[in-house]
Amino acid sequence: MQRFFTKEDHSYRVKKEIRDLVVFATHNVLIDAPFTKLDLLSCRNLLIYLEAKAQHKLLPLFHYALKPHGLLLLGLSETIGGSEQLFSRH
């Protein structure tokens, strides 16, 4: 744990050298242009809060944003719905 985190008061903080490897940004997935060439797109428990129309809009955008062998990480209650042709299960 000390390799990746430093203790601060009653919590832990990810070390700077790890934070420098990750892009942190506020992003509205329904409005903003998608990031591209992502290795991993994690939106655990995002889709369950969106209406079906928004979900159907986002899944092709997520596919576009990922590298050819990139991973889409969904929550246990989420599915790729009608976008099976865009994604494979691992």
Image (cartoon, rainbow, N blue to C red):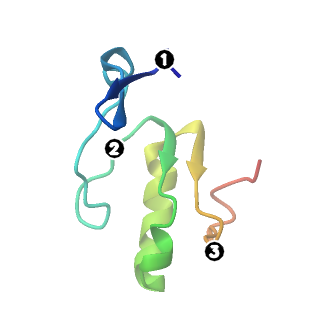
Closer to the N terminus: mark 1 or mark 3? 1
The image shows residue 75, relative to residue 7, as above or below, that is below
Residue 12, by quadrant, is top left
72 relative to 84 in the view: left or right? left
Q: Amino acid at mark 2?
A: Phe
Mark 3 residue element: loop
- Check disc 2 and report the residue beneath it: 35
Of the image marks 3 and 2, the number of the one nearer the N terminus: 2
Residue 70, image x and y in percent? Answer: 58, 39
**Which residue appears farthest toward the front when viewing the image?**
9
- In the rendered structure, find residue 2 and report the number of the disc placed on it: 1
Give the residue displayed 40% in from the left and 77% down from the top. Answer: 54
Residue nearer the viewer, 50 or 14: 14
- Determine whether, in the image, residue 78 is placed left or right of residue 11: right
- Lateral position of residue 32 relative to residue 58, left or right: left
Callout 1: SS: loop
Label 2 environment density (alpha carbons within 10 Å; few <14, some 14–19, many ≥20): some
Kind of residue at badge 3? Gly
> Is the residue 56 above or below the residue 4 in the image?
below
Which residue position holds label 3? 81
